[in-house]
Amino acid sequence: MLTAPNDTHPEKGIVTQLRAYLAQTNLPEDGRLPPERELAVALGVSRTELRKALDVLEAEGQLWRHVGKGTFMGSRPLDTFADISALARRSNPAEVMRARIVIEPEIARAAAFTATPADISEMRLCLARSRQADSWRQYEGWDTRLHRTIAEATQNSLLLGLFDTLNAVRRAVTWGRLRTAPMRPLPTHHSFTEHDNIVDAIEHRDMAGAANAMRAHLMTVERKLLEKQLRAANEG
């Protein structure tokens, strides 16, 4: 049993005890804490006092709770539809674009270092199929597949997870209402050449070139998005 908390500030003392206990304890791989009953005994406090201390650490982002499964160290993972939906409700297309501009150029940079010949072949397939698309829906499917293939080529599960989370939010945001274009992309659609530049840089192991090409591509997409928003506002 650990030292009793300071009586003058019992709540702070229990939080300090809990921090020390968690720092000293070898938790399972998933970071799950022992049941509250065991924790309360180990700390020499009541379960009510323990819950208040857990609330403090949860508010700090040091741990998270899953009803029916327990309490876990670390931040709550964004791996459920409810989490994605909550993010999407607080976001908008412009905000999603700014996040993409921050994250995806670095993904392209990493891919230029680690991409395999098979990855490059998949990227080339996406380029060809996007040009052959009969509709915007088909084009966007191949566009998404290309960007995810680039993320997969990093061979980094965390970067891929970040990409998937961002892409899920992007899809959940009402992006389609801003689409005012022909039934299919024109042959002169800016993304075709921009995607070529990204894949060429990745294939040639040009890390800076891949990042710059991805950033230029996404900034063009952002600019066109803002132009559509302005037109929609003026027409309204």
Image (cartoon, rainbow, N blue to C red):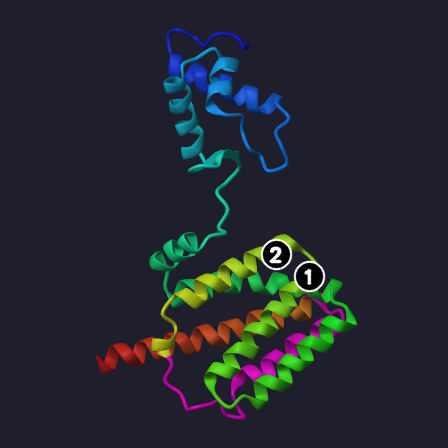
Label 1 – label 2 distance at C-alpha: 8 Å
In this picture, is 60 found above or below 210? above
Q: Which sits in the foreground, 198 or 1?
A: 1
Disc 2 is placed on an element classified as: helix
Q: Residues within 10 Å of mark 1 (few under 14, many from 20)?
A: many
Region of the chain picked out in magenta, as a range: 179-207
Residue 158: image x %, image y %? 62, 52
Residue located at (77% from left, 68% from top): 116
Say if the magenta span includes residue 142.
no
Q: Earlier in the sequence, mark 1 or mark 2?
A: 1
Residue furthest toward the left? 236
Q: Amino acid at mark 2?
A: Leu
> Can the viewer see residue 56 in this picture?
yes
Left/right placement of residue 168 relative to residue 108 reads left
Q: Amino acid at mark 1?
A: Thr
Q: Which sits in the foreground, 229 or 129?
A: 129
Residue 178: image x %, image y %? 35, 77
Quarter of the rendering occupied by the N terminus: top right
Say if the magenta span includes residue 202.
yes
Residue furthest toward the front? 68
Residue 20: image x %, image y %? 55, 19
- What residue does disc 2 label? 159
- Disc assigned to residue 224: none
- What residue does disc 1 label? 154
